[in-house]
Amino acid sequence: MQLGFLVDLHLCMGCKGCEIACKVENEVPLSTWRLRVKYVDVGTFPETRRTFTPLRCNHCENAPCERICPVSALHYLENGIVNIDKERCIGCSGCVMACPYGAIYIDPQTQTADKCTYCAHRVASSMMPACVVACPVQANIFGDLEDPTSNISKYIQVHQGGIQVRKPEKGTNPHHYYVGGGNVTLNPLASHRIDGHSLFTKITTLPVGGHH
Amino acid sequence: MVHETLAATNAVVTLDVALPGIVWPWLVTVNMWAKSIGTGVIFMLFMLLRMHPESAKSLRLSTAIVAFIFINIFLLFTLADLHQPFRMWHIFVHSHLTSSITVGAWMATIFLGLLTLLMFFAWKKNDEAYDKLLLWVAILAIPVTLYTAALMAQCTARELWQMPTEAAQMILAALLAGSATMILLGGDKLSSEAKNTLGVVLGLSALMAFIIYMSEYIFGPMKAEEVAAVLDYVKGDGQYTVMFWLGQWIAYLLPMLLILLSRVSKSESILKLAAILALVGLAMVKHVWLMIPQLLPMS
């Protein structure tokens, strides 16, 4: 079994339901996120459009975080999920530095690394990840990549030419795919990030792990 | 390529979470700086005992003590940077050997043990045992100083820290810091020939390190857009431009000039000034190179 995720960006409408569901399900502390939806506006008024990109751990086949972790706190499960053992983590932040997707954070309450686990605890009980359940338009597709009859495999077969991953040049072989993505949505360097000009906040950076 | 795309698309992030700030702070700079001194003085003593044995023999104990102190500083700051420092022992009982952190921790611990033994032999004035052990300590000092380059290379997210240049920079930093420290430590015990040799090592390692930094500065942007974006922080009115150039001048250019001047004027004071500047500048250079890749948004 090799679990994977696919997000159809044609369907995503940026409701952030997945983000909230993840926060609640995993009790993700304030100032940290396992899953977030990034809005990028493209074009010049009046020819503008808004794109929405859910971003979470890519559960890479060749995960830099697993390789750099000095105590195997980050480890592979048999179903391909890159999981984390918070009791073992020493908080060296090596994984935070290694992850090309910025998907790992230091939990300010436990002072250990944490990230999306594809809701491994729910998957173990044959349930779907919380974000999949919450999505009103089924933009999040989750399943076994090795099973040709699974929804995700069928989706990949149908959209063969349009399947993308983030930063393929890093050689991490992510198990998280996008349909309908582009440079603007998947490459963080392809959009301006103007300090203090986000819609609802002027905070652009936060200290790692709270006040360390 | 991205810069043209930006102009064409006018893409702006309008809603996102706050991104993490600096992950590895100045504590890691001190870690690298202290390790360069701790390993570098061992390289230098090994060299001096072969090239200028009469002059260097009195430095056996003091060099071992300096190396011991700076390797302890290196380990202390590594520990201080952990978010869960009291779980540090997990590294030894749950060792994950693909990680440079694990391998480095084991090697540094063994290195520290050997330094303790060196101090003991020096205190007992057992020069034969000391010199035999010094060979192995000097050999072990190579991977101990290099492991940080491997660790930085394992940070897949940070394109700037390419293994080939980082490995060279780590060794050069050890040679620079080691020779500078030995110039200051040697005082009147070292002959002028021995100091000249240390000056040559200091000057050449400064020159080579400077060349590599300039190569990265000029050619780095051609190899990856991430490197280009990161190096923007040390170009123009970048956040670290001033510190970067101050570091290059204080660590490399001024020491090189001062070493030439000291050889012409046969002034030991100028040589010592070069050594002090090299040590101060090295911390600045290391700090800038550590910080700038962390300023780039990863997602």
Image (cartoon, rainbow, N blue to C red):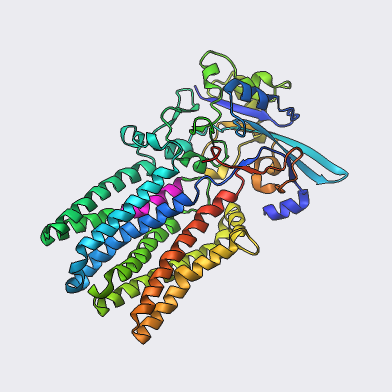
- Vertical arrangement, residue B225 with respect to residue B277, above or below: above
Q: Position of residue B268 (x, y in %)?
A: 33, 79
Q: Residue at x 32, y 69 (%)?
A: B184
- Vertical arrangement, residue A135 with respect to residue B42, above or below: above
Residue B29 visible in the current orientation: yes
Secondary structure predominantly adopted by residues drawn in magenta: helix
Q: Residue at x 63, y 43 (%)?
A: A205
Seen from the viewer's position, the closer of residues A100 and A20 is A20
Tally of numbered discs: 0
- Vertical arrangement, residue A77 with respect to residue B216, above or below: above
Q: Position of residue B175 (x, y in %)?
A: 35, 64
Q: Position of residue A49 (x, y in %)?
A: 81, 39
Seen from the viewer's position, the closer of residues A133 and B28 is B28
- Kindly indicate the quadrant of the structure image that contains residue B60: bottom left
Assign the N terminus of chain B to one quadrant of the image: bottom right
Q: Residue at x 23, y 73 (%)?
A: B189
> Hey, which residue is sitting farthest bottom in the picture?
B265
> Hey, which residue is sitting farthest top in the picture?
A125
Q: Residue at x 72, y 51 (%)?
A: B5
Residue A64 visible in the current orientation: no
Seen from the viewer's position, the closer of residues A19 and B57 is B57
Instruction: Answer with left or right where residue A131 lies relative to residue A172.
Output: right
Instruction: Answer with left or right where residue A192 lies relative to residue B109.
Output: right
Residue stretch rendered in magenta on the structure: B142-154
- Kindly indicate the quadrant of the structure image that contains residue B98: top left
Assign the C terminus of chain B to one quadrant of the image: top right
Q: Position of residue A11 (x, y in %)?
A: 74, 28
Magenta residue check for A195: no
